[in-house]
Image: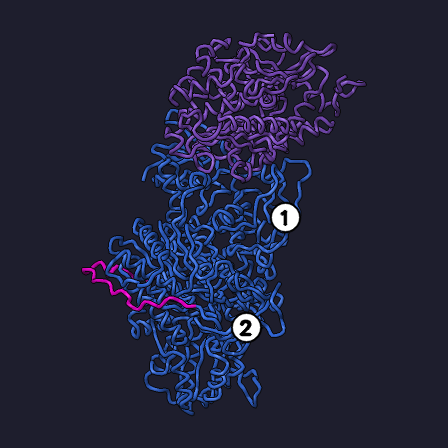
Chain colours: A blue, B purple
Amino acid sequence: MTTIRIDGRDCPTRSDINLLQACLEAGANLPYFCWHPELGSVGACRQCAIKQFSGPDDRKGRIVMACMTPVSENTIISIDDPEARDFRASVIEWMMVNHPHDCPVCEEGGECHLQDMTVMTGHNTRRYRFTKRTHRNQDLGPFVKHEMNRCIACYRCVRFYRDYAGGDDLAAFASHDNVYFGRAEDGTLQNAFSGNLVEICPTGVFTDKPFSTVYTRKWDMRGTPSVCVHCAVGCNTIVNAREETLRRVLNRYNTDINRYVLCDRGRFGHGFVNAPTRIRTPLNTIDGQQVSVPMADALTAFARMAAKGRIVGIASPRAALETCFSLHTLVGPQHFATGQTRHEQECTELAHALLTRHPGALPTLHEMESADAVLVLGEDVCATAPRLGLSLRQSVRQASFHTADNAKVPRWMDAAVRTLGSECPSALHVMTPAPTDLDSVAAETFRAAPDDIARLGFAIAHEIDPSATPVTDLAPDDAVRATRIAHALMAARKPLIVSGMQYGSLALMQAASSIAAALARATPAAGLSLVLPECNSMGLAMIGGLPLETVMEQARAGEISTLIIVENDLTRDLSPADVAELVAAVPDIVVIDHTVTPLCHHASLILPVAAFSECSGTLVSQEGRAQRFFQVVFPPAPIQAGWRWIQALARSLDPPPRPITGLLGWRDLNEVLAALAMAFPNLAQAAMAAPGADYRINGEKLRSQTYRASGRTVIRSFISVRDQPPPASPDTPFSSSMEGAYGPEMPGALVPTYQAPAWNSVQALNRFQFEIGGPMRGGPSGIRLLSHAEHHDTEPHPYAYATDIPAPYAPQADAVLVLPDTRLFGSEELSMFSPPIIARSTAPMLGLPASVTTSDRMVLHLEDGPHILPVEPVPGLPAGIALCPAHMVARAFRFPRMARLETVPGEGERS
Amino acid sequence: MTPASERPLTAMIDPAAGPPDCAAYGRAGGWQATRLALGSLAPAEIIDMVTRSKLRGRGGAGFGTGQKWSFVPKEPASERRKYLIANADEMEPGTFKDRWLLEGNPLQLVEGMILAAYGVQAGHGIVFLRGEYQEACARLHRAIGEARQQGWLGENILGSGFSFDIHIHSSAGRYICGEETALLTALEGRRATPRSKPPFPQTGGLWGAPSVVNNVETLCNLPHIIANGPEWFTGLGLGDDGGTKIYGVSGRVTKPGAWELPIGTPLRQIIEDHAGGMRPGYQLRALLPGGASTAFIDATALDVAMDYGSVEKAGSRLGTGMAIILDDRTCPIGMIRNLEHFFAQESCGWCTPCRDGLPWVERLLDAIEDGTGRDEDMDQLDRHARMLGAPGRTFCAHAPGAMAPLASGLKLFAADFAAHIQQGRCPHQAGAGAGAGP
C-alpha cells in the first residue's frame, strides 16, 4: 500500500496498479474507455488524461494518461485541473465527431458507458460542422447486432475477442478515422464468448440480438441475481425481466468464478423459458388425451394415483437442491432416485469423493488463471465447461507475466506484456481424444483413447510419486512423455490437473486425482478440478439416491405404482426400449417440468414448474459451491417452484404419511433449507449461499428495479390503468419494485443490477468492488461446501492411489469406440430449446479419423437402431474411435460404448 | 563539388555506372571496416567508437546512435536472439535521401548493418523497405545475394565466429511504419500501430526480442566511422554534431535535389549554392526544414546552421534535413491543407485525438481554402494545434508532427487565413496562373 494525492486529498492505494484504477478505487469520477479491468491498459482512447505533478512545488504539471501511469510513492495528481478537464472534454468531442447521436433508438441507451462518460466530461455542444463518416453494418449471426456507426474505436472488442478469448474472426480493419471493427465478411461470430462484446463494448456497436426482439430499457426491467443453469461451472448471472417475460441474461461479477465473462451458451441459452415448448398449465391424460386442467383437479388426480400404491421419485441434476430435497422428503430415501444412470452416478460420486479427499487445492476459476502448469486429462473443457476453458486459456500467460516482472513492466500494461511474452512458452498440456479449442495455445497436445490417456496419467503420477501405482507395458514414447510432463508439473509452483466425466471414464478422473495428489506432497497449491455435466450434478451427488437401473428393476417387478419425475427427460438416459418398458410397468407417471420433453408424452399428469427465472433456489457447482438464484419473473399460477409442487402433492395425500409432516409446513425457502441442513449436514451451509428472505437493510427490502423505473401503472396501462400492487415472493429479500434499499455495500449475492451515481452501464460494477477486479464490497456470492482446509489440521495420511489401471485401448475391426462429440451448442439439453442456440447448432456429423474417412456417409448402429450420418474427418483422432454428437443423434446414449460402423449400402467409397 | 573524401556516403554513387558490386565496392574502400571490426575489435569497442563519433539518428529524431545501442543486452549473438533492423520506410513527404543511398550503393548499407549488428551482437538483420521502392528492392536483393555468396553475410563471417544475415521486408504501406515500434508491429504481421514504451525495442522489440532500429543514412555512416575513426567523423561536421548529412531541397528552386554536405551547413548555403536559389519570379516565403512534420521557418531564419540544436533554436526541427520550400505564389493554406490531408489519412487510427482530430483539421482547412471558412474555424484550428501538438497527449509523435506545420503556419500566415475567411475565397487563385507553377 502507498498513498497518493488526488486533488489535494491523500488517498491510500495499492502500489501495483495504475492511476486510473487508483482514482476509481478512491471513488473519483474519471472517465475512460479502452481500459478494462480484465483487459488491462493500452492507452488508446486518451480519455483518462489527468495532470501529474513532479513534486509539491511543481505548479505546471504535465498531462498523462492515468491508465498508463503506475502508482508510485508520493504521486501528486489532479483530475480537476482545467487543462486536463479541457483535454478530456476534447477527447469526447473527437469521439462524437462521427457518432450518430441516435441514443433514443439505440439499445444501449440508458446503460451506455459513452453516455455516462460524455455527461461526466461536460461535453454538450457539437462544434464539428462537417459531414459524418458512415459505415455499413454486418450480420454477425444470431447473438450479436452490429452498428458500426456508433463506434468510438476504443479497440476493446478486438482485444477481448482476439487476445483474451482467442477468437480470430473479428478484427480491426482499415485505418485513420475509417477504422472498422467487424468480420472480413458478414457471418456468424465463431468464438464461444462473442456475446460478451455486448458488455465489453462501451457503446451500442455490439448489442444483444435476442434481447432486441423483446427490447426494453434497463430502467424498466426488474433484475435479480441468478446462476447459469447450462453447465456445472456455476457462472453468476443477472436476469432481467419486464412484466412477466424474461428479457435477457447479463454477466454478474463473481471474483472467483466468471468475473467479467459468460459463455454464449450461458448468455443466450435462457430462451427455453419463453419458448413455445413451455408447460404453462397442469395437463392430465384423460382417455389418451392430455388436457389442461385446473390445479385442484390435478392434485385430486394425483391423490387418486397415490392411493394405488408405492410412489417413487426421480430427481434430476438440473433441478435445484430444494426441489431434489423435497422430493427426497416426500418419497423417502428408499424410493428416491437421482435420475442418473448408474454409470453417471458413479462418475459424479467419484468426482465428489476425489475432490473431498484431494490433499492439495481445489482452485476456483480465477485461481486457475494463475496456474503455471496445467494438464487437461481427457476432457474437452471448451465444450463441457466453456468458462473454465477460458480461464485455462489465460493461464498460459503466466510465463509472459514473469518476463514482464523481470523487465519491470507492470502486468496491467497489456500490450507491453503481450509484446514481451510473444514467444514465451505455454505450460498447458492438452490430452484429449479429439482436438479442442485450447490446442492452439497448448505447449503440447496428445491424442489417444480415454483409457490410454488415463494410463499416461497414471504413469505421470507414478513418475511424481513412486508410491503411486506404476503402469506396465507403456509404449516407450509414452514413457518419455510421462516423464517430461511430470517434470514440467513438478517444476511448477501452482500446477493444475483438470479432468471430467465427458467420456464417462472413471479411470481418467482417478488418474487426474492421482497426479494432483502426488504433486500436492511437495506442492500444497497443486490443484484438482473435475468437470461435471449439469448445474446441480454436485448437489445431487451430495444427496445421493438410487440409479435409474434400480428404478427399472423395481418397475419390472411391479413395485412402482406412481413415478414422480422432476425436471428430467428420462429419454435422454434410458433407451427407447427401457422407456417403453417403464411406461408399461408403471401405472402413473407424473412429470414435473417446465418444458415439454419427449418424456411428457408418456405422462399421466404433467405439472408446470417454474423455470430458474421464476423461482428461487440453490445449485451446487462442480467445485462444490452452493449458490442462490432468485425469482425475477412472477408467472401466473399454478406455475411454481418444484418444492412447492411437491409440497402441494404431499398435502393432497390423505392421510399424509408420517415422515413428511415437516414438508407440509414449509412456508418459504428458508424453512426448506433449514430442513435440508438437518437431513443432510454436508449440505447445511447451502442455506448460507445468500442471505435469506428475511434479510433487510435499514429495515427495508432490496429493490430489484432501478430508481428510474417508469411508473408502474404505465407499464401495464395497455391492459389496465389500475395500480397493481407489485408482486411479492416469500423466498427472496427483494421488493420486486423500485422501493427498497440498494447500494454498493449490499451483499454480493444480492446485487440485482449495477448502477451508481453517474454510472449507469455495467461499468458501475467498479463501485461495488473493494478493489477493482477484486472482491465485492458486500462479500462473496455463494459458499463453498468442499474445502481442503480441514486436511491441514491433521498429519497428512498417505494418499490412497487408485490401483485399477485400464488396459490399453485395442481398436477392433468391426466396431468403433463411440465417444461424445460434445458441442457448445447442441449437446446441452435446455439451451437447445432456445432459438438463438438452436440457430447456432450445426447438423450432427460423425467424426472419424482422417485415414478412415473414405465415404461421405456411414451407418452407425446404436441401441435404438441404425443412424445414417454424414462423416467428417477429425485430424489426429486415434484409430478405432468415432465422435458422435450424442443427443443430436440418439436421444439416449451412454458413454463409452462400442458400436458397429458400416458403409451405407449401395454407396461406394469416395474416390 | 565537395571532394569525395568529405562526402563519404555518396562518394561511390555513380548513377551512370549503377551501384558497385562487391569487388568494386571493395576496391573503392569498402569492407575495410568489416575486416577491421570482425578481425580485431570487440563489440563494445564498436559501440564506443560510434558513441564518440557523435553520430545521431538520421531518421528525424536525432537520438545518439551509440547511446541507443548501449541499452541492448550484451549477450553474444549466438546466445540470444536479437534483431538489427534498417528503417528504409522513407515516407516523409519531400524526403528522398535514403532512396539515393539504397539505389546508389546498397552494399554500403549492407556493410553498415553488419557493423551495427556486430556491435549490438544481433544475428538477424531486416531491411524494412518502403513498398514503392521497387528499384531499391531489386538492387538490395542483388547486393545481399552477392554479399552472402562472397561470405560477407551468413555463418561465421570472416572466420570471426559472428554470424549475421539480412532479410528484406517490402512494406505493405502506411507512413506510420516509419515509427520504429509500429514498424516492429508491422513486421510481426499485425496492424501497424505504435507500441507503448517500456519495453523499449532495445530490450523487448521484434517478437519480444532485443531489437535495434536505425535509419538507412545512419547505418551507411558506420563503415566510414569504423574505417576512419570517430575523430575523423566528428571533424567532418561544422558544429556540435559529427559527420555529413544528406540535405535536400524541393519546391520552386532552380535545381531541386539532394547533396551530401557537412552537418551544420547553413540553410542559406544549401538553398542558394546547391539548389541554385529560387526560380525567376518566385520569392522564398517560408520553408519546412526537414520534411512535412517540421515547423515552418520563414526567410528571416535562413542563416540557421542545419544541425539538430540550431534548427531547434530556430523553432523547428532538423528532421530528415530535406527542406520543402513555400514560395510567394503558392497558397500557404493550400500547402498546409495538403500536408494535413496526408497526416489525417496516415493516422493509424489507434488513439482518439489523432484519429478524429486530424480529419477535423483537414476539413477546416478544406473549408477555409474553398472559401467557406468561418471565424470560429480559427478557434478550432488553434484548439487542435494546442491539444494535439503537446507530447504525451497522443499515443505517438504522429499528431504532434502533423501539428508542427499547422501551429507554425497559424502564426506565420495569420493574415492569409484571415483573408481567406473574409473574402470567402483563396486569394492566391484570383489571378490567372497564380498558384500553379510554370
For this view, does B372 lie left or right of residue B306?
A: right
Q: Give the quadrant of residue A274.
A: bottom right
Residues rendered magenta in the picture: A783-810
Chain name for mark 1: A
Residue A395 in the image: state x and y as whole percent: 40, 50
- Compare residues A813 and B132 and report the one nearer the observer: A813
Image: A230 above or below A770: below
Which quarter of the rendered picture does the C terminus of chain B lie within? top right
Residue B427 in the image: state x and y as whole percent: 75, 20
Residue A83 in the image: state x and y as whole percent: 50, 30
Which element type, helix, strand or loop, lies under badge 1? loop
How far apart are the alpha carbons under marks 2 and 1?
59 Å
Residue that numbered label 1 is attached to: A102
In this view, the residue farthest toward the bottom is A308
- Compare residues B171 and A395 and report the one nearer the observer: B171
Magenta-span inclusion, residue A892:
no
Labels 2 and 1 share a subunit: yes
State which mark lies toward you, 2 or 1: 2
Amino acid at the residue labelled 1: Asp
Image: B159 above or below A548: above
Residue A57 in the image: state x and y as whole percent: 38, 24
Amino acid at the residue labelled 2: Glu
Residue that numbered label 2 is attached to: A902
